[in-house]
């Protein structure tokens, strides 16, 4: 994605099902679990570069010893910094007690993070500041083992205000109004309720307080805690949590908006946001990793038993398609095939734009995350060119001229790496105009890859969100190669609506497709539609969630997708460039054909999977109309 967009976070949870001594004997290290956690996080570092955190819980700790450890970092190399601290803790423990090097139980008692339950988180700051306090995992501490709670997640809630008010209504005094805090305290409240329920029952049976604590750990109904907590969550979420006595869970939203996968064997239960991370960390096949069912929680008990359990009735599955287009690592078996299919799907429109000329286009990709889609595009063009070659050869008859035959066989689509990004190009100039001139050189070009005045240059991107980088940098840079026409291809459809489930696209005015639609309404003297949508959006304010409707769809209704694409091309074409600029977008039908199991497309179609999404888009439009440069949630 040439526009830098922050997006979903990543989670990693590991529950060791054997004593640490087992891993010491089999793998030569009691830190087997921590090493696997490190791998899971490194293999998902694409999901968070604003910070990271880890936490661990030691099961059945001796009184007087710390049993919950947590460390967070906002360092640019946060994962390595966190595990460097773990390594120092190990070295210090061995220096103080050399016997701990071979005695796993001694190591567990003395070394921080030497626990059986581990939780890791990678953060992208899509909302809130980037301070350490906003990094996960977050804790709710208590002297009673079973009342401790550690939570981390990949989530955004659209109804934070209602959740906050609910906490206040039950007597709490939350210290901040954020979805993280409301989720932590809501689960924590029902954790307390469950503790009280079991304790009251066993007091009537004559158990003493120490015995009751043990009974709570054995009988805690984690599923019911989650049922009570999540009943009014509105958003996309994959929530991971650990209780102080050793129970753990990962809960996925009913629409399956946010991803979660798990793997289990006799030694370990592990969860991650992406399947390849689990495959790499535990060296297992694709078929051995399970997708967490929407509306369910994977619940892991203190005794190591585990099961998926229903928490909320699953709804229509609307898994985020941006995961497949851009966010997830392309090393996943299905993601790779889907990105190839996305590249193939746009080829008919590309051929229309280049007048079906397959001899003069140069194909490329910007940025590197669009590389697989580019391969798909090239494969489709090769298939189409092969059909042309076959027809021409047949037309030559039984005795073709060898020179002409060689010329036909030599025809192939031209793939070139025309752009290279300078990862660290900084500027000391503060004047906006002068800064824009330097920003235009964030990418550099490979000279000589395009025949000036003859070739069409076709470059594919994952998506076009704001278009800022295209206008300020990429198009100017590509024009220096002298192409006849620059065709920018988006493997995603037009992004028309804000996201509210974890992608940093919360303002209508930032979206170039929306700006294009507004410009078309103004040009065609249909400004009354803007006023009508504003009035209808205002009428939605204060209405219950289940009555919310997306009023912003009317902005796009008068125009075809092609009209909007043409206007976007006009808006993004910089002054002074020589090449004609054309845009080709993926169709909604092409998207669903390529990614059939990930039908979440609300940022393209406005069809939000939860009522809170409709409320957010209406708020975003109101903010735009009133000139407020603020987020809608």
Image (cartoon, grey):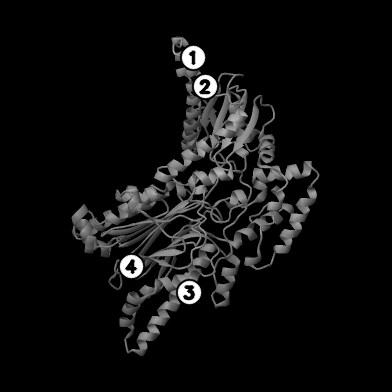
Quarter-wise, where is residue 469 in the image? top right
Q: Nearer the viewer, mark 3 or mark 1?
A: 1
Whichever of labels 2 and 1 marks the residue nearer the N terminus, that label is 1
Contact between marks 1 and 4 (CB within 8 A): the answer is no
Which residue is under mark 2? 449
Whichever of labels 3 and 4 marks the residue nearer the N terminus, that label is 4
Quadrant where the C terminus sits is bottom right
Residue 187 visible in image: yes
Mark pair 3, 4: CA separation = 23 Å
Contact between marks 3 and 2 (CB within 8 A): the answer is no
Q: Nearer the viewer, mark 1 or mark 4?
A: 1
- Residue 129 lies left or right of residue 67; in this view the side is right
Disc sitting over residue 396 in the figure: 1
Element class at badge 1: loop
Which residue is under mark 3? 189
Contact between marks 3 and 4 (CB within 8 A): the answer is no
Q: Nearer the viewer, mark 4 or mark 2?
A: 2
Pinpoint residue 561: horizontal percent, then vertical percent.
Answer: 66, 42
Whichever of labels 4 and 2 marks the residue nearer the N terminus, that label is 4
């Amino acid at each position: 994605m040439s526009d830098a967009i922050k997006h979903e976070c990543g989670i990693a949870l590991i529950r060791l099902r054997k004593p640490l001594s087992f891993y010491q004997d089999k793998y030569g290290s009691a830190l087997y679990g921590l090493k696997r956690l490190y791998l899971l996080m490194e293999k998902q570092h694409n999901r968070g570069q604003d910070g990271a955190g880890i936490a661990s819980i030691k099961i059945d700790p001796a009184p007087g010893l710390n049993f919950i450890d947590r460390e967070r970092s906002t360092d640019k190399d946060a994962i390595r910094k966190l595990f460097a601290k773990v390594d120092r803790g190990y070295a210090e423990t061995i220096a103080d007690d050399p016997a701990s090097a071979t005695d796993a139980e001694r190591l567990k008692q003395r070394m921080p993070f030497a626990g059986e339950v581990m939780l890791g988180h990678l953060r992208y700051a899509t909302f809130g500041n980037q301070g350490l306090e906003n990094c996960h995992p977050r804790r709710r501490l208590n002297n009673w083992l079973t009342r401790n709670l550690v939570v981390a997640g990949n989530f955004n809630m659209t109804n934070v205000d209602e959740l906050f008010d609910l906490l206040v209504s039950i007597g709490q005094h939350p210290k901040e109004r954020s979805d993280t805090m409301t989720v932590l305290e809501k689960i924590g409240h029902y954790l307390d309720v469950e503790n009280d329920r079991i304790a009251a029952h066993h007091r009537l049976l004559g158990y003493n307080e120490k015995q009751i604590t043990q009974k709570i750990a054995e009988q805690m109904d984690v599923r019911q805690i989650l049922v009570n907590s999540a009943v009014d969550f509105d958003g996309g979420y994959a929530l991971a949590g650990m209780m102080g006595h050793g129970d753990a869970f990962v809960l996925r939203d009913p629409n399956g908006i946010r991803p979660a996968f798990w793997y289990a064997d006799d030694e370990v239960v592990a969860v991650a946001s992406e399947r390849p991370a689990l495959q790499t960390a535990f060296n297992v096949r694709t078929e051995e990793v399970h997708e967490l069912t929407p509306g369910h929680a994977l619940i892991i008990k203190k005794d190591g038993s585990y099961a998926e359990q229903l928490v909320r009735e699953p709804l229509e599955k609307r898994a985020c398609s941006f995961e497949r287009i851009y966010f997830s690592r392309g090393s996943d078996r299905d993601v790779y095939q889907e990105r190839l299919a996305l590249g193939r799907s746009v080829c008919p429109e590309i051929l229309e734009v280049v007048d079906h000329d397959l001899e003069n286009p140069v194909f490329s990709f910007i940025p590197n995350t669009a590389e697989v889609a580019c391969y798909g595009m090239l494969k489709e063009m090769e298939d189409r060119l092969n059909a042309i070659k076959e027809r021409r050869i047949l037309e030559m008859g039984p005795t073709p001229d060898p020179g002409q035959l060689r010329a036909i066989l030599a025809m192939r689509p031209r793939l070139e790496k025309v752009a290279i990004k300078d990862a660290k190009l900084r500027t000391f100039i503060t004047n906006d105009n002068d800064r824009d001139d330097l920003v235009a050189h964030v990418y550099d070009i490979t000279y000589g890859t395009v025949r000036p005045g003859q070739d069409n240059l076709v470059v594919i991107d994952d998506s076009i969100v704001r278009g800022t980088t295209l206008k300020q940098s990429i198009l100017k840079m590509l024009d220096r190669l002298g192409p006849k026409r620059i065709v920018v291809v988006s493997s995603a459809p037009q992004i028309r609506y804000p996201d509210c489930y974890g992608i940093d696209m919360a303002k209508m005015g930032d979206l170039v497709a929306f700006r294009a639609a507004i410009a078309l309404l103004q040009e065609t003297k249909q400004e009354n539609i803007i006023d009508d949508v504003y009035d209808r959006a205002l009428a939605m304010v204060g209405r219950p969630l289940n009555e919310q409707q997306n009023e912003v769809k009317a902005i796009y209704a008068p125009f075809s997708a092609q009209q909007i694409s043409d206007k976007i091309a006009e808006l993004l074409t910089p002054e002074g460039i020589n090449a004609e600029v054309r845009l080709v977008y993926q169709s909604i039908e092409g998207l669903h054909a390529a990614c059939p199991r990930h039908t979440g497309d609300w940022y393209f179609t406005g069809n939000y999977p939860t009522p809170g999404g409709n409320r957010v888009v209406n708020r975003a439009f109101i903010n735009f109309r009133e000139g407020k440069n603020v987020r809608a949630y």
